[in-house]
Structures are given as structure tokens and as C-alpha cells.
Image (tube, coloured by chain):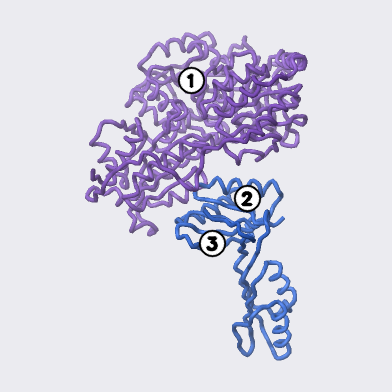
């Protein structure tokens, strides 16, 4: 099962490699990993998407907590949450397909942010499975390039991951 | 007080109460060595190879419970230390390793003797620090000791660029009395409800067993473990790392468990209906095949590390805590309980355990014309009256030491259990002897292992650390040969060296006493003579039966109840190796 683990970690050089190294050393799966500073400059926030059995994810959470630089973490799947990922897709267009791709992008609330006579760049945000659906909805042969940010997420309601 | 980085480093170690630094100088640490030269409080032990420094500091730490301290230079000095750091990490030994680094401005430029020590050691340290600001140096040292010694202990590397230690840059010095790290909370107390659940399981058990490990030694919980075990009257088995935490000569002790554990310990584990695991981590050498592990047992697990809980074997009750308060609380709860464990059930259970014990799985041929390695260890036990600190290397001799030297006290048995590092024994023995100069220290080794760090014989002379080296010389990498005999149809691929040095001459060349012992009747007198030479390091080269194997043995992929036993195979004295 997919898990989205949100981590507050000391904003120090090497923090990312400690997390990435833990996953490779113990053979855990990383589907995506995003990291950036937070409102508190001493902290970075990582969002890590992984999958595995309950036992494996339980170990992943414990091993992450064991890293000295990890301040706090939550598995977003344990609480109501919002998941978002940004995707940029470059597609070939021609007179026949321009309208159709525009329509599909509208349905997915995507924006066309670059236009040439033969291409579009479509920007879409949403939960990762929505982005998957968009890719499935357009003609695979028209796709030139796909860039995805990896999922980020936040819990709903007043409770949050902070120190 | 204004000090240079090098002076701050040394002064911080003094303020931390460090007695010994095990190290080796080089370019990146010259400022530090200059500061070391100008003081007399801390004694520096110059090893002959950085691996030796880490093992010596490790041996010191295991015997004393205090953190071992290592100082090495950048590049090859640092990489040579890695095996010892990984050794300490696998056995949760508190150590602080200070490695030199090239100056900050040239880091990343492939400078002379530059290596990414932080990157290399990341997977085998509890934590590591690169010092980038001399004003943070003292605090970083304090943090390193704090992290290394609290919670589940482990090695911490502090990588110090050369310019940080420059003599002309002086900054105010103050060693922090304590530090707190917001992301690190080592003291954990278990929920009361867990103890109650544990009590219920203990009261209901018909065939209980206590399985305790190195965590009890590290957490100084022997007294509490012994009290709990006697209070309950249950059989107890120790892991390789836990030996000595409960007296081995006590009737309740049924020996070590696992791959080379006793028949009674492994059978009792397999048939038990309750396992009380204390400071043990269900390592693969203990469990054998996981699917077959203890099929009837409920499990209570005491451990300081939450990540140890249900890592390989799912447990029923977890008590995450330091061992001493946890066992004290458990003892109180059992004492206060009106209900007690069933005496009747325990009597039946003990009868079964004694039946298993009666097969005498550690018996060996005592009439052999050849020296049996087991006999040497037994005689060592008698000559030292069971009071020696015993270090070992890795292989057959390590298992015989664990099986035949009865450790009645904790911190006396010092070996590389997790990583299984050949070359550990001699430098570790030197570290122990420095800590306890008036105690007997023996290194049980083999002719293959000893050659991995033999250069430390020179260190032993320089610092007058008269240890006794018990070399069980069977002219084979015995454990490799044993596996090749059992599982590779006797194809002895490279488990033999046909150019073994003359160890007597070698010992003498290093300034020590060498003895070669070839007959069983000479074993005891040689040991007595060696230990009577109080101020000399003695290398005892015992020429042993080269065909001897370690029994019992659970082969890979088998369960605890499926052991290879010597009794079933008959004696094997002087058989021809195919």
C-alpha cells in the first residue's frame, strides 16, 4: 500500500543523503521524495512516498525516527490529508489534436502554459492518481516529455506537523 | 579562555573525562597532535594501523562501559578506521572517532588524502558531524559523546578539517555542561499497561524461557536480570553478546542459543510457550529460519530501541525502555502480584529441560592424542579461575571460547558478534588491559584471525600491556573449512594457508615471549607459566586437532530443533579430511 510520510528534518547539509541512504541500505522503496525549506529556516520538510506491507512501513517509520536529524514525522495516510503533485507535460499538437488536448486539460483543470505551432506544455496539479488519469486520457504517442514534482501533502484541520 | 581549535579539541576530551586516545598521526591532524604533545592528562596510544585503534578503543569501551576515543588522519587513516567503526556500530558500542579532514576551502577538490568520511561512514555510525566552524567545535564534541553514550549506544564520527584546528585562530572556549538535541530523545519510558500485559503472560506461561542479549551488558542490567531470573525460576539462555550478564555456572543457565548454541537452549526456545527477550535483537544467527522460529511462543520484548521491536520476529508485548528501570519495574510487579507462575508447570518444564541437558551436547573426546581446542579453553578457564577478560577474533575459536569459558560476570567476554570482524581480538585485548592493568586478559584467536591485526603486537610492547594470546592453530580457517565440509562436499577452497609463520619467532621478534604447545599434557603447564609471567605478553601457539568442528550446529535454513550434534556423529579425532 502507498504511504506518504511527511518529515521535519534539521536543515543541515547531508540530511537528504541520510534519508536516501537509509532507504537504499535497507532496501526500502522510494516512489518519490521532495524536500524544501519551511517557514522555520532551521528545518527542512520532506515528503516521501513509499509502499510496502504494514510491517515494512512500520520499520521505515521507526528507522526514520532513529535518524538523529529527524525532528518529527507523520504518515499522512493515518489522518485526513490533502495530497498534491505538480506535473508539466509537453505534447505534440497538430490542427486535429489541439482542440482535443485543450478540452482534456480543461476537464482536469490543467492550464496550457506554453504554446508553439506544434506543441503545448500543460500544467496540472492534484493527487498523483489524477495526474496518472490525465496521462491515460491523452494519446500516449503525443507525449514528448513528462515532469512530475513528486507528491507533497498536508494534514487537514487545525493539527499539523510542527515543533 | 581563548584556545585554538586543536587545543579546544584536546581540552574538550579532558573535560569529558577521557583517559586514552587510540590513534595514528598524519597531515590533517598534525595541529591536534601538537596540542596533544603539550599536555599530560590524556594518554595517547599509538597503534600500528588505524583498524587497531578502533578495535582497541572498542575493547576499552566494552570492558569499562565508558566511550572509547579514536583519533585518525584524513583519507587512508579514516578509511582504515571504517571496519572498526562498523564493528562498534553492529554491537552498539559507544565510541567517538575524530577524523582529520582536508581544509574547508579544498573539500570537494580531490585534495591529497581527501575522502568523504561523512559519506563513507553514514551507514555505519549512530551519527556523524563535519565541523565547519571552530566556535561550534566544543559543542559538537559534547554532542558526539552525548549521542554515543545514550539510548542505544553507538559510534559517532566527528570529521575535523585541518583549518579548524589551526594554531593561530583562537576563540573563547567553554565546554558545555550538557547539551540537548531537539530531534533526539534517548530516554524512553514504557507504558504501565505493557508491564501488566507482560505480567499476565508470565503468570499464564507453562514453558517459559528468558532470552537475553548484549543490551543487558550495555545497559548494566546484570544485577536486575539475575534477580528477575531467580525470582521467576525460569530457564535462561544468553546470546553470544549477552554472555556474562547472567552467571554461566548458575543452574538456571542453559547455555548460549543459536547457530552454535546448546541443545538444551535451542530445544527450550523451540518448545517454549513464552519467550522473555531482554536486550536481544532476534539476529539471524539466533533465530535460524524465521518461519520455523519458536512456533508455540508468545513473546515479550524489552529493548531500548523501538526499531528493534518486531523487526524480524513479531512480538506480543513490547517494553521500550532502558533495561534497569524496566526490569526493576517488572520485578516489583511480579513481587506484588498475588498470583504466581505455576510451580507445577515449571517443575514439568524443568524436567524436560534437564532431559535435553543430559545429552551433554558439548562433550568432546578427552582422550585424543591431539590438543582439542575445547580443552585449551577449559584449561584457560581454570587457570584464570574464570576471572579473565577474554577477547576473541572470529571463527571456530570464538564459538569454543563462548561455549567453554563460563562467563560469570558481565563485560568479561569481548568479541565482535554482529559484524564478525577478524583481527578484533588482539587490539581489543590491548584496550582492555590498559583499562584493567591488574586483571588477566586473554585473546583467544586462530592462526588466520591473528594475522589480520598482528602488527599490534608492537603496540602491546610499547605500552606494556601484557596480554596472553591463545592461538588455536589448526592450520585452517576453521569455520570456513567446517562449512565447506558440511555444505560444499569437502571442497576446501582457499581455507588453508600453506605458509603460516612461526609464531614463536614472530612473538620474539616483536619483543614478547612465544611458546609452541603440541601435546595435550603440556596445555595446562604452558598456560600456568604464561599467566605467571605477569609483565610479559605471551603468544601461546597451540597446535590443535585440525579436523575439529564446532557442535552443535544449526545449518542455514533450519530451525532450532534441527541441530547437528556431535553425539550423533561419533568422535572425530584425527580423522582424515577428505
Expressed as whole percent of the image width and height from the top left, the position of residue A37 reads 49, 62
Tell me the mark number nearer the camera, choosing from 1 and 2. 2
Say which colour chain B has.
Answer: purple
Left or right of B337: which side holds B477?
left
Tell me the mark number nearer the camera, choosing from 1 and 3. 3
Q: Are marks 2 and 3 on the same chain?
A: yes
Q: Report the chain shown in blue.
A: A
Expressed as whole percent of the image width and height from the top left, the position of residue B350 reads 73, 15
Expressed as whole percent of the image width and height from the top left, the position of residue B60 reads 42, 28
Chain name for mark 1: B
- Decide which of B555, B204 is in the foreground and name it: B204
Disc on res. A27: 2
- What separation in Å lies between label 1 and label 3 (alpha carbons)? 55 Å
Mark 1 closeness class: few <14, some 14–19, many ≥20 residues within 10 Å: many
Look at the numbered disc 2 and give the secondary structure of its residue: loop
A123 above or below A80?
Answer: below
**Residue at the outermost front position:** A158
- Decide which of B218, A110 is in the foreground and name it: A110
For mark 3, what is the residue? A35
Look at the numbered disc 3 and give the secondary structure of its residue: strand
Disc on res. B470: 1
B368 above or below B417?
Answer: above
Amino acid at each position: 500500500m502507498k504511504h506518504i510520510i511527511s518529515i521535519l528534518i534539521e536543515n543541515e547539509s547531508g540530511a537528504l543523503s541520510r534519508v536516501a541512504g537509509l532507504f537504499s541500505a535497507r532496501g526500502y522503496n522510494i516512489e518519490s521524495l521532495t524536500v524544501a525549506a519551511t517557514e522555520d529556516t532551521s528545518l527542512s520538510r520532506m515528503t516521501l512516498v513509499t509502499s510496502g506491507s504494514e510491517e515494512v512501513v512500520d520499520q521505515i517509520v521507526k528507522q526514520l525516527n532513529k535518524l538523529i536529524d529527524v525532528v518529527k514525522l507523520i504518515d499522512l495516510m493515518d489522518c485526513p490529508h490533502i495530497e498534491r503533485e505538480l506535473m508539466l507535460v509537453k505534447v505534440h499538437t497538430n490542427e486535429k489534436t489541439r482542440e482535443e488536448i485543450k478540452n482534456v486539460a480543461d476537464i482536469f483543470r490543467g492550464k496550457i502554459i506554453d504554446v508553439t505551432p506544434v506543441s503545448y506544455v500543460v500544467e496540472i496539479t492534484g493527487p498523483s492518481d489524477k495526474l496518472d488519469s490525465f496521462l491515460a486520457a491523452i494519446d500516449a504517442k503525443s507525449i514528448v516529455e513528462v515532469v512530475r514534482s513528486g507528491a507533497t501533502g498536508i494534514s487537514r484541520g487545525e493539527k499539523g506537523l510542527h515543533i | 579562555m581563548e584556545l585554538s581549535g586543536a587545543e579546544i579539541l584536546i581540552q574538550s576530551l579532558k573535560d569529558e573525562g577521557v583517559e586514552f586516545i587510540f590513534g595514528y598521526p598524519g597531515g590533517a591532524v598534525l595541529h591536534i597532535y601538537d596540542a596533544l604533545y603539550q599536555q599530560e592528562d590524556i594518554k595517547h596510544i599509538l597503534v600500528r594501523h588505524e583498524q587497531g585503534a578502533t578495535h582497541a578503543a572498542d575493547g576499552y569501551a566494552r570492558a569499562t562501559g565508558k566511550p572509547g576515543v579514536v583519533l585518525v588522519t584524513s583519507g587512508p587513516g579514516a578509511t582504515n578506521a571504517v571496519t572498526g567503526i562498523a564493528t562498534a556500530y553492529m554491537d552498539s558500542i559507544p565510541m567517538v572517532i575524530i577524523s582529520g579532514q582536508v581544509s574547508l576551502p579544498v573539500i570537494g577538490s580531490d585534495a591529497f588524502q581527501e575522502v568523504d568520511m561523512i559519506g563513507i561512514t553514514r551507514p555505519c555510525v549512530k551519527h556523524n558531524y563535519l565541523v565547519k566552524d571552530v566556535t561550534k567545535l566544543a559543542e559538537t564534541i559534547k554532542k558526539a559523546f552525548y549521542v554515543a553514550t545514550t539510548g542505544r549506544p553507538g559510534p559517532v564520527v566527528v570529521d575535523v578539517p585541518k583549518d579548524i584546528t589551526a594554531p593561530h585562530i583562537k576563540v573563547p572556549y567553554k565546554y558545555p555542561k550538557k547539551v540537548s538535541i531537539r530531534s533526539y530523545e534517548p530516554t524512553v519510558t514504557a507504558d504501565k499497561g505493557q508491564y501488566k500485559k507482560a505480567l499476565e503472560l508470565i503468570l499464564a506461561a507453562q514453558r517459559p524461557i528468558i532470552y537475553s542479549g548484549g543490551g543487558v551488558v550495555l545497559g548494566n542490567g546484570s544485577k536486575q536480570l539475575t534477580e528477575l531470573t531467580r525470582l521467576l525460576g525460569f530457564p535462561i539462555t544468553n546470546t553470544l553478546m549477552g554472555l556474562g550478564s547472567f552467571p554461566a555456572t548458575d543452574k538456571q543457565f542453559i547455555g548460549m542459543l543459536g547457530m552454535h548454541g546448546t541443545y538444551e537452549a535451542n530445544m527450550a526456545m523451540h518448545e517454549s510457550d513464552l519467550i522473555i527477550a531482554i536486550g536481544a535483537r532476534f539476529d539471524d544467527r539466533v533465530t535460524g529460519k524465521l518461519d520455523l522460529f519458536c512456533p508455540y511462543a508468545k513473546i515479550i520484548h524489552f529493548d531500548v530501541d523501538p526499531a528493534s521491536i518486531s523487526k524480524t520476529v513479531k512480538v506480543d508485548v513490547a517494553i521500550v525502555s532502558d533495561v534497569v528501570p524496566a526490569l526493576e519495574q517488572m520485578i516489583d510487579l511480579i513481587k506484588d502480584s498475588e498470583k504466581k507462575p505455576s510451580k507445577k508447570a515449571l517443575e514439568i518444564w524443568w524436567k524436560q529441560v534437564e532431559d535435553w541437558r543430559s545429552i551433554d551436547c558439548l562433550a568432546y573426546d578427552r582422550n585424543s592424542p591431539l590438543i582439542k581446542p575445547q580443552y585449551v579453553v577449559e584449561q584457560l578457564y581454570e587457570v584464570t579461575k574464570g576471572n579473565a577478560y577474554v577477547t576473541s577474533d572470529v571463527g571456530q575459536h570464538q564459538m569454543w571460547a563462548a561455549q567453554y569459558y563460563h562467563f560469570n560476570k558481565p563485560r568479561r567476554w569481548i568479541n565482535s558478534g554482529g559484524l564478525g570482524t577478524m583481527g578484533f581480538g588482539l587490539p581489543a585485548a590491548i584496550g582492555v588491559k590498559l583499562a584493567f592493568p591488574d586483571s588477566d586478559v586473554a585473546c583467544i584467536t586462530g592462526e588466520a584471525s591473528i594475522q589480520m591485526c598482528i602488527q599490534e603486537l608492537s603496540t602491546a610492547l610499547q605500552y606494556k600491556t601484557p596480554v596472553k594470546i591463545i592461538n588455536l592453530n589448526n592450520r585452517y580457517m576453521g569455520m570456513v573449512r567446517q562449512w565447506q565440509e558440511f555444505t560444499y562436499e569437502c571442497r576446501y577452497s582457499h581455507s588453508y594457508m600453506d605458509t603460516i609463520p612461526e609464531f614463536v619467532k614472530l612473538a620474539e621478534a616483536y619483543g614478547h615471549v612465544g611458546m609452541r604447545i603440541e601435546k595435550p599434557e603440556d596445555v595446562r603447564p604452558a598456560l600456568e607459566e604464561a599467566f605467571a609471567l605477569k609483565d610479559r605478553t605471551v603468544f601461546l601457539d597451540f597446535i590443535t586437532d585440525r579436523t575439529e568442528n564446532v557442535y552443535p550446529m544449526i545449518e542455514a535454513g533450519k530451525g532450532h530443533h534441527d541441530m547437528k550434534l556431535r553425539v550423533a556423529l561419533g568422535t572425530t579425532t584425527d580423522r582424515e579430511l577428505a
